[in-house]
Image (cartoon, rainbow, N blue to C red):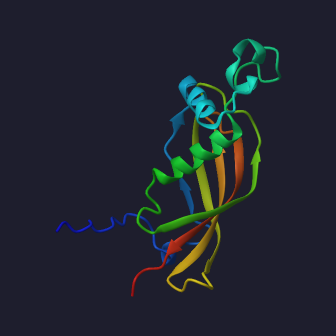
Amino acid sequence: MIEAPEQVVLGCWFEDFVVGEERLSPGRTIGESDLNNFAGLTGDYSQVHTDEEFCKKTEFGTRIAHGLFGLAVAQGLMWRTNYTQGTGVASVGWDKYAFKGPIKIGDTVRVRWKVVHKRESKSKPNMGLITEFVELVNQRGEVVQSGEHITLIRRRPK
Protein backbone atom coordinates (compact mmCIF):
# COMPACT_ATOMS: atom_id res chain seq x y z
CA MET A 1 0.00 0.00 0.00
CA ILE A 2 1.34 3.41 -0.97
CA GLU A 3 0.91 6.08 1.66
CA ALA A 4 0.15 9.68 0.83
CA PRO A 5 3.23 11.91 1.05
CA GLU A 6 3.54 14.24 4.00
CA GLN A 7 2.47 17.80 3.48
CA VAL A 8 5.39 20.11 2.73
CA VAL A 9 5.36 23.14 5.01
CA LEU A 10 7.40 26.08 3.76
CA GLY A 11 5.00 28.80 4.84
CA CYS A 12 4.43 30.73 8.01
CA TRP A 13 2.10 29.50 10.72
CA PHE A 14 -0.55 31.88 12.04
CA GLU A 15 1.67 32.69 15.03
CA ASP A 16 4.52 33.76 12.72
CA PHE A 17 2.56 36.59 11.07
CA VAL A 18 3.24 40.02 12.55
CA VAL A 19 0.95 43.00 12.01
CA GLY A 20 2.94 45.57 10.04
CA GLU A 21 5.17 42.98 8.38
CA GLU A 22 5.72 43.66 4.65
CA ARG A 23 6.54 41.28 1.80
CA LEU A 24 7.45 41.67 -1.87
CA SER A 25 6.97 39.19 -4.69
CA PRO A 26 9.15 38.58 -7.72
CA GLY A 27 8.05 40.31 -10.92
CA ARG A 28 6.16 38.98 -13.93
CA THR A 29 6.04 40.51 -17.39
CA ILE A 30 2.61 40.46 -19.01
CA GLY A 31 2.54 39.07 -22.55
CA GLU A 32 0.02 39.17 -25.36
CA SER A 33 -0.69 35.47 -24.86
CA ASP A 34 -1.73 36.21 -21.27
CA LEU A 35 -4.56 38.47 -22.46
CA ASN A 36 -5.62 36.02 -25.16
CA ASN A 37 -5.56 33.04 -22.79
CA PHE A 38 -7.52 34.89 -20.10
CA ALA A 39 -10.12 35.99 -22.68
CA GLY A 40 -10.45 32.37 -23.80
CA LEU A 41 -10.71 31.09 -20.26
CA THR A 42 -13.36 33.60 -19.17
CA GLY A 43 -15.15 34.32 -22.44
CA ASP A 44 -14.47 38.06 -21.97
CA TYR A 45 -13.43 39.15 -25.46
CA SER A 46 -14.11 42.84 -24.85
CA GLN A 47 -12.45 45.06 -27.45
CA VAL A 48 -10.25 46.78 -24.83
CA HIS A 49 -8.54 43.41 -24.33
CA THR A 50 -8.53 42.00 -27.85
CA ASP A 51 -8.70 44.71 -30.55
CA GLU A 52 -5.52 46.75 -30.94
CA GLU A 53 -6.92 49.01 -33.66
CA PHE A 54 -9.97 49.84 -31.56
CA CYS A 55 -7.75 50.52 -28.54
CA LYS A 56 -5.51 52.98 -30.40
CA LYS A 57 -8.47 55.40 -30.20
CA THR A 58 -9.12 54.85 -26.46
CA GLU A 59 -7.63 56.69 -23.51
CA PHE A 60 -5.28 53.71 -23.03
CA GLY A 61 -3.88 53.78 -26.58
CA THR A 62 -3.40 50.01 -26.59
CA ARG A 63 -4.96 46.80 -25.28
CA ILE A 64 -5.14 46.41 -21.51
CA ALA A 65 -5.40 43.35 -19.31
CA HIS A 66 -8.67 42.33 -17.71
CA GLY A 67 -9.03 43.65 -14.17
CA LEU A 68 -9.68 40.16 -12.83
CA PHE A 69 -6.58 38.93 -14.65
CA GLY A 70 -4.55 41.40 -12.58
CA LEU A 71 -6.13 40.11 -9.37
CA ALA A 72 -5.37 36.52 -10.39
CA VAL A 73 -1.75 37.44 -11.21
CA ALA A 74 -1.43 39.19 -7.84
CA GLN A 75 -2.60 36.04 -6.03
CA GLY A 76 -0.19 33.93 -8.07
CA LEU A 77 2.77 36.22 -7.39
CA MET A 78 2.05 36.13 -3.67
CA TRP A 79 1.90 32.33 -3.83
CA ARG A 80 5.31 32.20 -5.54
CA THR A 81 6.90 33.39 -2.28
CA ASN A 82 5.69 30.21 -0.51
CA TYR A 83 4.63 32.28 2.48
CA THR A 84 1.53 30.09 3.05
CA GLN A 85 2.79 26.83 1.48
CA GLY A 86 1.43 24.06 3.71
CA THR A 87 -0.11 26.47 6.23
CA GLY A 88 -2.69 28.33 4.17
CA VAL A 89 -6.14 26.73 4.21
CA ALA A 90 -8.22 29.07 2.07
CA SER A 91 -8.44 32.52 0.60
CA VAL A 92 -11.51 33.75 2.47
CA GLY A 93 -12.01 36.85 0.38
CA TRP A 94 -10.85 40.02 -1.23
CA ASP A 95 -12.30 43.26 0.09
CA LYS A 96 -12.23 46.88 -1.08
CA TYR A 97 -10.29 45.80 -4.18
CA ALA A 98 -9.82 48.60 -6.70
CA PHE A 99 -8.52 48.73 -10.26
CA LYS A 100 -6.49 51.95 -10.19
CA GLY A 101 -4.68 51.90 -13.51
CA PRO A 102 -4.25 49.85 -16.66
CA ILE A 103 -2.00 46.83 -17.03
CA LYS A 104 -0.58 46.80 -20.54
CA ILE A 105 1.22 44.18 -22.60
CA GLY A 106 4.90 44.44 -21.70
CA ASP A 107 4.32 45.74 -18.17
CA THR A 108 6.19 43.96 -15.41
CA VAL A 109 4.16 43.73 -12.22
CA ARG A 110 4.94 42.62 -8.70
CA VAL A 111 3.04 42.54 -5.45
CA ARG A 112 3.86 44.20 -2.17
CA TRP A 113 1.69 43.44 0.81
CA LYS A 114 1.49 44.06 4.51
CA VAL A 115 -0.28 42.25 7.32
CA VAL A 116 -2.79 44.74 8.73
CA HIS A 117 -4.82 42.51 11.06
CA LYS A 118 -4.85 39.02 12.51
CA ARG A 119 -7.16 37.13 14.82
CA GLU A 120 -7.75 33.59 15.99
CA SER A 121 -10.67 31.80 14.37
CA LYS A 122 -13.74 31.58 16.57
CA SER A 123 -15.06 28.43 14.90
CA LYS A 124 -11.77 26.65 14.11
CA PRO A 125 -9.46 26.71 17.15
CA ASN A 126 -6.51 25.33 15.17
CA MET A 127 -6.63 28.23 12.67
CA GLY A 128 -6.52 32.00 12.44
CA LEU A 129 -7.31 34.75 9.96
CA ILE A 130 -4.86 37.26 8.59
CA THR A 131 -5.80 40.36 6.62
CA GLU A 132 -3.24 41.81 4.22
CA PHE A 133 -3.26 45.10 2.33
CA VAL A 134 -2.12 44.15 -1.17
CA GLU A 135 -0.81 46.36 -3.97
CA LEU A 136 -0.08 45.26 -7.54
CA VAL A 137 2.64 47.60 -8.78
CA ASN A 138 4.04 48.08 -12.30
CA GLN A 139 7.65 48.67 -13.36
CA ARG A 140 7.23 52.44 -12.90
CA GLY A 141 6.19 52.01 -9.27
CA GLU A 142 2.55 52.86 -10.06
CA VAL A 143 -0.09 51.00 -8.04
CA VAL A 144 -2.43 49.50 -10.63
CA GLN A 145 -4.60 47.49 -8.22
CA SER A 146 -5.00 47.32 -4.46
CA GLY A 147 -7.22 45.91 -1.75
CA GLU A 148 -7.45 43.67 1.27
CA HIS A 149 -6.97 39.90 1.23
CA ILE A 150 -8.19 37.67 4.03
CA THR A 151 -6.62 34.22 4.43
CA LEU A 152 -7.36 31.30 6.76
CA ILE A 153 -4.03 30.02 8.15
CA ARG A 154 -3.22 26.98 10.27
CA ARG A 155 -1.91 27.52 13.78
CA ARG A 156 1.34 25.81 14.72
CA PRO A 157 0.66 22.27 15.94
CA LYS A 158 1.16 21.82 19.66
- Specify whether 118 is left or right of 56: left
Q: Nearer the viewer, residue 54 or 118?
A: 54
Answer whether residue 82 is visible to the viewer in this image. yes
**Image point 70% across, 43% down: which residue?**
143
Residue in the image at 39% along x and 88% along y: 158
User: As drawn, is 13 to the left or to the right of 108?
Assistant: left
Question: Eyeballing the image, is 17 above or below 34?
Answer: below
Residue 34 quadrant = top right
Q: Quadrant of residue 44?
A: top right
The quarter in which the N terminus is drawn is: bottom left
Residue 15 left/right relative to 113 = left
- Residue shown at 60%/45% (left/top)? 72
- Vertical position of residue 25 compared to residue 91: above or below: above
In this view, the residue farthest toward the front is 1
Image coordinates of residue 139 in percent, x first then y, are 61, 34
Give the number of callouts.
0
- Please name the residue shown 46% across and 73% down the image: 13
Picture coordinates of residue 152, whole percent (x, y):
56, 70
In the rendered view, does 100 fall on the left or right side of 125?
right
Q: Residue furthest left?
A: 1
Relative to 118, say whether 108 is above or below.
Answer: above
Given residues 97 and 133, the one toward you in this image is 97
Horizontal and vertical percent position of residue 125: 54, 86
Would you identify the image quadrant in which residue 87 lies? bottom left
Is residue 19 visible in the rendered structure shown here? no
The spot of residue 85 in percent (x, y) is: 42, 62
Residue 35 lies, with reference to residue 98, above or below; the image says above
